[in-house]
Amino acid sequence: MADRSSSLPPSEPGSDGAGSNPGDAAPGLGEQIGRTRKALFGLIGSHIALARAEFSEIADEVKRIAGLVGAALFLLFITAILIFVGVLLFAGEAIFGSMGWGVLLGSELLIAVSVILLLGVLELGFSRTSGSFLVALGVALVIGGLLANDWAAVSRNNTSLPGQPWLAVASGAVLLGILFALLGASFGRGAASGAAIGGIVVGGLLGLLASAGPGLRVASAIGVAVLLLMWPITAAVLLFRHGIDTGRLKERFYPSQTIETTKETIEWVRAQLPLGPKS
């Protein structure tokens, strides 16, 4: 009998499932979506890491530039201070004959301007600022003129006048007494009398100094010092003499419109809300 198995055709792979491989099957839709999402998140994470690295480098560069710019600005600030101080010292030496005057007058100038600016917060105003400056300038001119006058020459040219020291002392007492009395008259008779007495004392002392002949430079320096001293004092006196408008200050620092608008809004909301159950 012939072998029949040899006459049968060979079976094709996978026709009966014996030669099939489950690992070679195509992935499903869910698995493909998962792989795609994982790849997408990995790509996004890579971009985030790259961005962090770049921004870290940019931040380091910004810090370095900020440090260099800050150092440069600090040096420029120090340079400006040195120039300002140097100009004051040079002006004191060139104009008044001593660097000490530059230090004193420069300090007075900065203090005077600072006080004027602070008084400006309280509504000092341009008119009071300029008025106080003119008053201080008048006092400075009187004192500077008293010190700059050559009292020795006046005594020599007028033999009928008393000696040099007494003439200077009397002149200073009279001039300053009248000037201080006029300044104090705005506060009443009592203030005028007290100011006149103070002016006589100060004028006598300045007259005694003037009799020694300090010279034009020293007299000018003292006059400028008096100007820078009297200016903020006179400005403060004028400001507080006429009173401070506290209502206007309140308006500047109190948000009245916002508060009133908020109150109106609250009332409107209450009017729109339904009434609750009556008890």
Image (spheres, grey):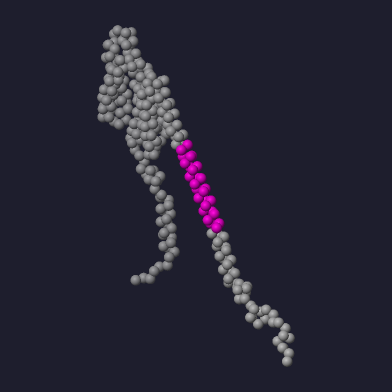
Q: Is residue 99 magenta?
A: no
At 43% across and 52% down in the image, what residue appears?
A: 258
Q: Is residue 26 above or below residue 242?
A: below
List the single residue furthest toward the bottom: 1
| Residue that appears at 53% across and 51% down | 54
- Residue nearest the observer in this picture, 235 or 42: 42
User: Residue 172 lies in what quarter of the image?
Assistant: top left
Q: Position of residue 246 (x, y in %)?
A: 35, 43
- Residue 201 in view, yes or no: yes
Residue 140, visible in the rendered structure: no
Residue placed at 59% from the left, 69% from the top?
32
Q: Is residue 50 magenta?
A: yes
Which span of residues is magenta-colored?
46-72
Count of numbered badges drawn on the protein: 0
Q: Position of residue 205 (x, y in %)?
A: 27, 20
Q: Residue furthest front?
A: 1
What is the quadrant of residue 14 in the picture?
A: bottom right
User: Which x, y percent locates residue 11?
Assistant: 69, 82
Image quadrant in which the N terminus is located: bottom right
Residue 213 located left or right of residue 52: left
Which residue is painted at 37% across and 26% down in the image? 103
On screen, 32 above or below 264?
A: below
Nearer to me, 93 or 147? 93
Does 63 appear above or below 117? below
Quarter of the picture holding the C terminus: bottom left
In the image, taking residue 42 as reference, residue 105 lies left or right, namely left
